[in-house]
Image (cartoon, rainbow, N blue to C red):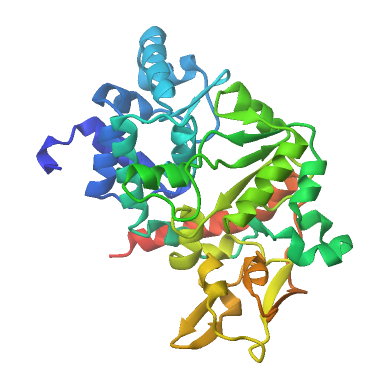
Amino acid sequence: MDENSIHPGHRKLAKVFSSVWLLGPPMSEQLLDLVSHLFTPEEAGLAVHLPYYIPRSVNTIACRAKMPPGEAASLLDAMADKRVILGTKRGYALLPLIPGMFEYLLANGDDTPWHRRYARLINDLFATGYTSIYSTRPSPMIRNIPVQSTVEQKSRVVDADLMSRMIASHEHMAVLNVCQCRQSLLFSGSPCRRASAEDGCLVFGSFALSTVNAGRGRLVSREEMHAIVRERWKKNLVFMAANLEPSNPNAVCTCCDCCCHYIESINHYGGRVSLARPHFLARVDEGLCTGCSLCVRVCNTNAHAMQGPVHVFDPGQCIGCGLCVEACRQRAITMEENPLHDPPSKSWMSFGMRILPAGVLSALKAMRTRKRP
């Protein structure tokens, strides 16, 4: 992009999106290109006055922007329709580029040239690794839900960790139209090697109802959800959710190493600090291992690898999913309880209080790092 062709409104809005409080990337040509694609100059001029996260009314935003409410409402509705800002009955707000706008914008499954260019731009920006500056303090935000058959013999211990418990805990459950990560990579010319873009996230409780009401997914029965879970396990996907007890509304991403941005952050950008220490970890009996490499093929976090004909296992990379246990024909891998695991939070309120200190400290450190010459 020609530096001189950038509209001042786009530059101001890009600076807003680069804020550490929006988990933003540093100012760059890539960020400016993305913002210019998402917003018209007029939209950008108003968007800089939007609050972060918590929606505010049209009148409040119009007052901040010194704009007639009717004119502001028209622009806000246009941005909300494109899903580049959050639009609710209460008002409008900005979301972080990723996670936030990324999921919100792609959730409907729309496929247009505009969406495809967006996918390429956001994937290129994420690939700069800027999210690593927000991964400096351990915070058990995300938990892996292990493959049930690998731990079901200890089900009394791990009920809270299994998909069966989550399915049993909710009357309403749904499947999103698409997986935003797989869809964005498909749009960028890199189709998933494990699953389809239509293999969307699984949502439970009130999240399921709001998803369906917004047209972003479909309700399914308990029987259907069990079948979908089995299918995803067979595709060697890992189940990642907010670290909450199963009775809470939640979303479960069925992730892969080739598309999922969270798995990518674990493998390359320090994202493991936001992963709760798992209830179970794999243990390998190298005496039984024949070096067949089947575990390597199913592992999404590079915990298993081959050094020539020799199998090596890095327990520090294991997230406790159990896929390797099912893949191993020699029964050389078992799952063992991790005495240091981080139990799920009781509620969304306790979850927020639990992760807030680490989030603030990481943001402050990112701010200090950017100010260094």
107 w.r.t. 369: above or below:
above
Nearest the viewer among 85 and 110 is 110
Q: Is residue 291 left or right of residue 67?
A: right
Count of numbered circles on the image: 0
Q: Residue at 27% of width from left, 34% of height from top?
A: 37
Q: Is residue 346 left or right of residue 267?
A: right
Q: Residue at 25% of width from left, 34% of height from top?
A: 36
Task: Give coordinates of residue 68: x percent, y percent.
Answer: 37, 9
Task: Give coordinates of residue 175: x percent, y percent.
Answer: 62, 36
Quarter of the image with the N terminus is top left
- For residue 167, which quarter of the picture? top right
- For residue 215, which quarter of the picture? top right
Task: Give coordinates of residue 17: x percent, y percent.
Answer: 37, 41
Nearest the viewer among 191 and 217 is 191
Q: Is residue 115 left or right of residue 314?
A: left
Q: Is residue 288 left or right of residue 366?
A: right
Q: Residue at 66% of width from left, 38% of height from top?
A: 203
Quarter of the image with the C terminus is bottom left
